[in-house]
Image (tube, rainbow, N blue to C red):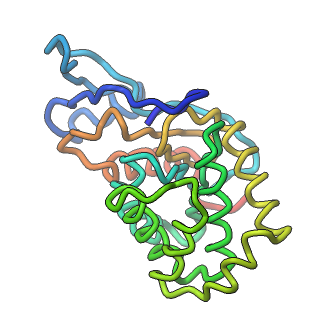
Amino acid sequence: MRLTTKTISIALIAITGSLSFAHADDFLSTGKVTATDPNTNKKIDIQVFGRSSVPNEYNVVRFFFTYTCPYGEKYDEEMAIWGSSLPNKFKYVRVPVITQEPNSVVGAFAYYAAWNTDRSKINEFQRQAFQLIKQENKDASDQWTYYQAAKRAGMNTANFKANWTTKRTELLVKNAIILGNKYKIQYTPTLTVGGLYTLNPEPIAESKTSFVDFANAITSKFINENGTAIR
């Protein structure tokens, strides 16, 4: 989902076929794949990943998301599982994206309140939050929605409420704003690797190649170029 002063959706582009490793080198060098424009039925090249330059992010993989994005709901759980399989020296981190939309601010506070309440249940909190917002049409700008998500996830709801207004939660939200600006996030979700590469799955949403396959390709490229030593 593209982020602007007001969040809007863009048309899906269906990638022709799946990413074969015969063409993987081309993809990794250009960041482009061949796709079919649904409006013209013509094949075009689309940019799937790009380069960034954010210092002090070595071996950090970030997943930028919003609760109102349909692709965030689609990929959040899948990418969390993938993130847990990364080499030990890598760190997988979700980052809520804050825009001018009020629901993004509320969502960011909710995520970090949940994180500070019980990290072991954060994946279930995410699942429940997306379920409430995307499937049950609950208001993404209402704190009560996330309170219900915390309750369904088995969190201590009193602690969740208390953590909403702590200094630590406030600092994490401010840091999320800084990170979004540093990476110049324009779409959600966006995956970033080591401060050097960004990957946006929206153009590949209808591809036979999964987001995980593209994430593996970009992460492997980073490791091949930089290794996995902590710097």
- Residue nearest the observer in this picture, 187 or 84: 187
Asked if residue 135 is positioned above or below residue 165 in the image, the reply reads above
In the image, 156: left or right of 49?
Answer: right
Asked if residue 93 is positioned above or below residue 72 in the image, the reply reads below
In the image, 98: left or right of 146?
Answer: right
Number of disc labels: 0
In the image, 162: left or right of 95?
Answer: right
The quarter of the picture where residue 118 lies is: bottom right
Residue found at the far right of this picture: 167
* Quadrant in the picture for the C terminus: bottom right
Residue drawn at the location 34% of the way across and 22% of the way down: 46
Residue 229 in picture, x, y percent from top left: 64, 61
Residue drawn at the location 64% of the way across and 39% of the way down: 99
Residue 170 in picture, x, y percent from top left: 80, 61
Asked if residue 72 is positioned above or below residue 167 in the image, the reply reads above
Residue 40 in picture, x, y percent from top left: 17, 11
Asked if residue 225 is positioned above or below residue 89 in the image, the reply reads above
Residue drawn at the location 72% of the way across and 45% of the way down: 177
The quarter of the picture where residue 132 lies is: bottom left
Residue drawn at the location 29% of the way across and 37% of the way down: 204
Residue 80 in picture, x, y percent from top left: 44, 66
In the image, 135: left or right of 143?
Answer: left
* Quadrant in the picture for the N terminus: top left
